[in-house]
Amino acid sequence: MAIHIEYETELSLGIPSESIITKVIETALELYECPYEAEVNVILTDNPSIAAINEEYRNLAKPTDVLSFPMLDYEHPADFSVVEDMSAEDCFDPDSGELILGDIIISVEKVIEQSEAYGHSRERELGFLVAHSMLHLFGFDHMEADEREDMEKRQEEILNQLGLYR
């Protein structure tokens, strides 16, 4: 498994970010039984940078906490059989042979702001955002109320396995 973490900001969370990100991704992959060695790219950035990306891809000219860019188009969330119908160059890294799940972009500033606003640790907030994004990379969404409730339960399940409680 390859987890590429890139810092595009001078801001620091003051926590073991790489360890938390790695543990959440590994737990999500295990919980949803991804049958492939996988690759996930994570970028930690600042509010102006994530606002620019948010405007470019979602036409929302404001910072957000996290953006997810899944590489797979699932028929059903976390149904990795979709990969069988795709060509290798569409979803596997040609150098490593790993399934490319997608990209996660997180605002470090939002992690700090939201952890304070919600009264929990930065570790928990970072873990939450990574778990949320991993579910998006698996094809889950939260556009409807029932989808939102389902995602919330799934996020908590991942976080609880890691002891990242509110």
Image (cartoon, rainbow, N blue to C red):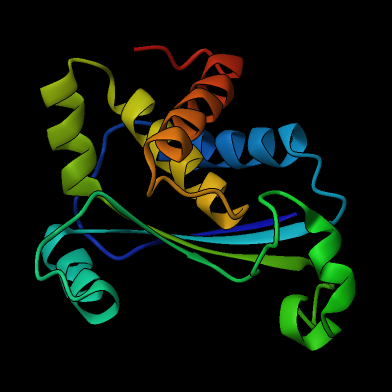
Vertical comparison of 69 with 110: above or below:
below
In this image, 154 relative to 33: left or right? left
Q: How many labels does the image show?
A: 0
Q: Would you identify the image quadrant in which residue 93 lies?
A: bottom right
Q: Residue at x 59, y 55 (%)?
A: 139
The answer to whether residue 4 of the structure is visible from this angle is yes
Of 100 and 1, nearer the camera is: 100
| Residue 112, position as x, y percentages in the image | 18, 35
Residue 16 on image: x %, y %: 42, 33
Residue at image point 28% right, 19% down: 121
Q: Is residue 16 visible?
A: no
Classify 140 as above or below 149. Answer: below
* x then y, percent, for residue 97: 84, 73
Toward which corner of the image does residue 164 lie, by quadrant? top left
**Is residue 86 shown left or right of residue 57?**
right
Q: Is residue 78 left or right of residue 19?
A: right
Residue 142 location in percent, x, y? Answer: 41, 45
The answer to which of 47 and 7 lies nearer the viewer is 47
Q: Residue at x 12, y 35 (%)?
A: 113
Quadrant the C terminus occupies: top left
Q: Say whether residue 28 is left or right of residue 20.
A: right
Against 12, is 37 above or below? below
Q: Quadrant of the N terminus?
A: bottom right
